[in-house]
Each structure stands twice: as C-alpha cells, then as structure tokens.
Image (cartoon, rainbow, N blue to C red):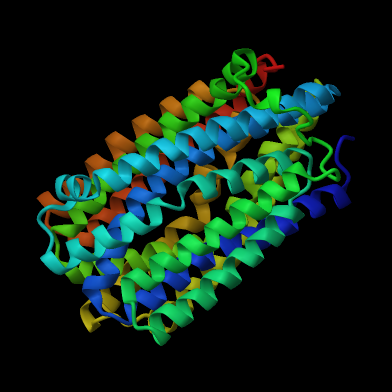
C-alpha cells in the first residue's frame, strides 16, 4: 500500500487546520468590517467575489502543479518533480503579477461594470478594498505554489504552520487598524495584505531550504520548460476554465443579489463566510485526494486510487454531517456575531438553515469527488460537467427563482442547491463507471 493510515492522518489533519485558518481570515475580515455597517460589509463582500475568482484560478494552476509533482514522485522521478515545482512557481508568480497590475489600473472600471447600480457608499468601499488586496496577489501565488509542492510530497505541515502565522498577523492587524486606528475597510484590506506578504516570503524561504526534498538547485530551473509547463497546464487550464466559469457564474448570481438591496448583499456575504467554515472537512479531503490519487496514478496503482478515494469521500461525509447538524441549530447564534440589521440577519438564518439540510446528502459528491477525477487526469469531464451545471442550473435557476418568480436571495440559494444536485449526479456516475481511471498518467 502506498499510504498507511498514519500517512493519511499526517496529510489530512494539517490540511484541515490550514483550511480552518484560511477560512478564519475571511471570517475575521467580515466580522471586523461588519462593525462599520451593512454598506461596508457589502462593498467588501462584492469585491471578495472577484478575489475568489482570481484565487480559484491560482488554485487551479496549483492543482496542475501538485498533480504533476505527485505523479512524478509516484513514478520515482525526483529530478522531474523538482523541475515541475520550479516551473509552477514561475507560472503562478507571472500570472499573479499581471493580474495585480490590471486590477489596480482598472479597479473602478471593473467594479462599475459588475456592480455599477449599488449605492455610492458600497461602491467606494469596494474600490478601496480591491485596490489594496490586489497588491497581495503575487505573494499569495508564492504561498500557494509552495503549498502545492509540499502537499505533493505528503507534507501539509509547512503550509499549515505558515497559515498560522498569516492568521495571527491578520487578526492582530485587524485589531490595530480597525479598532485602534478606526480605518474600517482600509484597515481590513491592509491587514490582509500584510499577512499575505509575510506568508509569501516565509513559504519562499522553506521552498528554497536545504530541507526541502524538491528544492530548486539551479536558477535555470525557473526558466520556461515548455514540456513541463504543458503537463501542468494540461490540468491547470481546464481546472482554471472550470473554476473561472464557476466564479464568473457566482459573480452573475451575486449581481442578481445586489439588486435585492443592501440587506440581501450583507446576508449573502455572511452566509458564504459561515458555509466556508462548515465545508472545511470536505474541502480538506478534496485537497488530500490530489496528493493521494496523483501518487497512486504515477505508480500505476489504479485500484489503490479508487480505494483511497472512497475512503476520503467517506471521511468528507462524516465531517459534513457533523458540521451541518451543528450549523442548523447554531445559526442564529453565529449570525449574532455579525453586526447585521434585523432584516439581513433573518435572511441569513433562512438561507443557512436551508444550506445545512441540502448539504448533508450531496455537497461532498459535488465538490470532493471531482478532485479524485482531476488527480487521475480526467480533467475534461470535470470541466465540461461543472460548466454545464453552473450555467444551466445555478445561473439559470437562480435567475428564474430569484428574479422572475421574486423569491429574492432565497431563490438564488435554491438555484445553488439545484446546481449541487446536478453535479453530484454527474460526478457520481463518472466515478462508479471507472472511466476516470482509464486516462494515461501525465508523466
């Protein structure tokens, strides 16, 4: 067996803590800025949807690098796995720098096109937040590429420890800038920037350390090697298109929500913040699948890939059930932490309780299972299935239920649940069929 129970635990536990800390950054930001009222939290929430798009594209590239590195490690080709890590860092840093420059140059234009109808105070908060957080993209790229390299080795402790530092800096920064200097939106954005800058430099130090088995030994390793880049992008581009389309679809849905008023925008923002927290166990299993299945495929052990996938999906369900049962009963208490108006709080409680009920049977199938397919190289199917489901079911159903039938934010979240159902069916059928294991190893 390629992985013992101890190996799986060593991979999963730090991943779960890291995901907890990553979500905590968003939760702390949302909580801190909520003290300035619905307009501030709404502006930050709208921009966070754009930031999520960019971060998801980075995550797709990191997934491509992690799959390639994992398969090379499984094959026993250490030299190529090192080169793959260097190429991943170069690709992600270049992408992040370009996106940061464009975001800073065209902040107002981008937000005006997407959310031009919102209140002036909401728009100004969004512009300020987007400008500051865009500066952090290159440093976030360094962190994510390094995290992918270490996870491909089965080592998730490094990224977890750096995530702890990042969270401490973010929390302390928020406390000083928001409560001490009363900088509100600027304070939250600046604290996020500082935390990501620190995380990027610390990760770079660990990646370049002699203790890293995949340390880049030559500067030339960073120069473009199109053979390896092609392998990374074989996973990264379809994943990026999939994640990009998913986030663009969410942006369209958020644009719908923004027409329902500030209370709906605020409720939607708090709702997404809380469900990110609840989804941590299942999301962590998805990240673990990239390493585990990728290593199995590289070693030619397809039966083990399927066996470990079933085991990790089962763990995802256990965590999801525990989290959502807790959420259903605790949601009024959790929403009380945020400085929401009574209307916004009532809406948040309704959609979150609906989320808890629907998530229990289908969320892991929708979002954990496809990572097993991706790690095996079955990327085209996951991309096509996700895009079809997003545009037909999520966007279409959200518009029909939320706007046409007038159910507002509740209708939009119902559209999201319909999307999950469609995804869960498509990915489960593919997994059971075994066709996802018919792909050749990338390496």
Foreground residue, 60 or 329?
60
Foreground residue, 372 or 200?
200
Q: Where does residue 91 sit, x and y in percent of width and height? A: 54, 30
Q: Is residue 281 above or below residue 213?
A: below
Residue located 33% across and 82% down the image: 35
In the displayed structure image, the side of residue 15 where residue 181 appears, left or right: left
Q: Is residue 247 above or below residue 303?
A: below
Residue located 67% across and 63% down the image: 17
Q: Is residue 45 above or below residue 436?
A: below
Q: Quadrant of residue 311?
A: top right
Residue located 40% across and 70% down the image: 188
Q: Where does residue 295 sit, x and y in percent of width and height? A: 77, 31
In the displayed structure image, the side of residue 349 where residue 300 appears, left or right: right
Q: Where does residue 175 sit, x and y in percent of width and height? A: 47, 81
Q: Where does residue 173 sit, x and y in percent of width and height? A: 49, 75
Q: Quadrant of residue 341?
A: bottom left
Q: Is residue 193 above or below residue 72?
A: below
From the image, which quarter does the N terminus lie in? top right
């Amino acid at each position: 067996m390629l992985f013992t129970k101890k190996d799986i635990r060593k991979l999963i536990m730090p991943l779960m803590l890291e995901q907890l800390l990553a979500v905590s950054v968003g939760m702390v930001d949302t909580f801190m800025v909520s003290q300035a009222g619905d307009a501030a939290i709404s502006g930050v929430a709208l921009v966070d949807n754009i930031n999520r798009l960019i971060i998801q594209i980075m995550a797709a590239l990191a997934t491509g690098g992690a799959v390639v590195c994992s398969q090379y490690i499984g094959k026993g080709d250490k030299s190529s796995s090192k080169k793959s890590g260097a190429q991943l860092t170069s690709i992600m840093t270049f992408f992040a720098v370009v996106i940061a420059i464009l975001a800073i140059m065209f902040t107002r234009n981008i937000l005006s096109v997407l959310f031009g109808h919102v209140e002036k105070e909401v728009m100004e908060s969004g512009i300020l937040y987007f400008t500051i957080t865009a500066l952090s993209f290159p440093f976030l790229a360094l962190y994510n590429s390094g995290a992918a390299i270490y996870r491909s080795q089965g080592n998730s402790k490094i990224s977890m420890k750096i995530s702890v530092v990042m969270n401490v800096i973010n929390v302390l920064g928020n406390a000083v800038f928001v409560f001490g200097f009363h900088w509100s939106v600027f304070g939250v954005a600046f604290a996020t920037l500082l935390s990501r800058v620190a995380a990027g430099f610390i990760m770079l130090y660990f990646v370049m350390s002699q203790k890293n088995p995949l340390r880049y030994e030559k500067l030339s390793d960073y120069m473009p090697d199109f053979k390896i880049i092609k392998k990374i992008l074989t996973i990264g581009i379809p994943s990026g298109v999939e994640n990009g389309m998913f986030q663009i679809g969410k942006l369209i849905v958020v644009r719908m929500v923004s027409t329902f008023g500030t209370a709906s925008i605020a409720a939607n923002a708090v709702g997404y913040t809380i469900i990110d927290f609840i989804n941590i166990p299942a999301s962590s299993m998805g990240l673990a699948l990239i390493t585990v299945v990728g290593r199995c495929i590289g070693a030619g052990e397809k039966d083990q890939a399927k066996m470990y996938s079933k085991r990790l999906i089962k763990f995802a369900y256990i965590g999801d059930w525990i989290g959502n049962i807790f959420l259903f009963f605790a949601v009024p208490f959790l929403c009380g932490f945020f400085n929401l108006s009574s209307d916004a709080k009532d809406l948040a409680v309704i959609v979150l309780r609906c989320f808890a009920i629907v998530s229990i049977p289908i969320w892991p199938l929708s979002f954990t299972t496809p990572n097993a397919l991706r790690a095996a190289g079955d990327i085209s199917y996951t991309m096509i299935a996700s895009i079809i489901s997003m545009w037909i079911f999520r966007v279409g159903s959200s518009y029909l239920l939320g706007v046409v039938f007038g159910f507002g934010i509740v209708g939009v979240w119902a559209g999201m649940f319909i999307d999950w159902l469609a995804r869960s069916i498509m990915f489960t059928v593919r997994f059971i069929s075994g066709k996802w294991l018919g792909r050749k190893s990338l390496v």
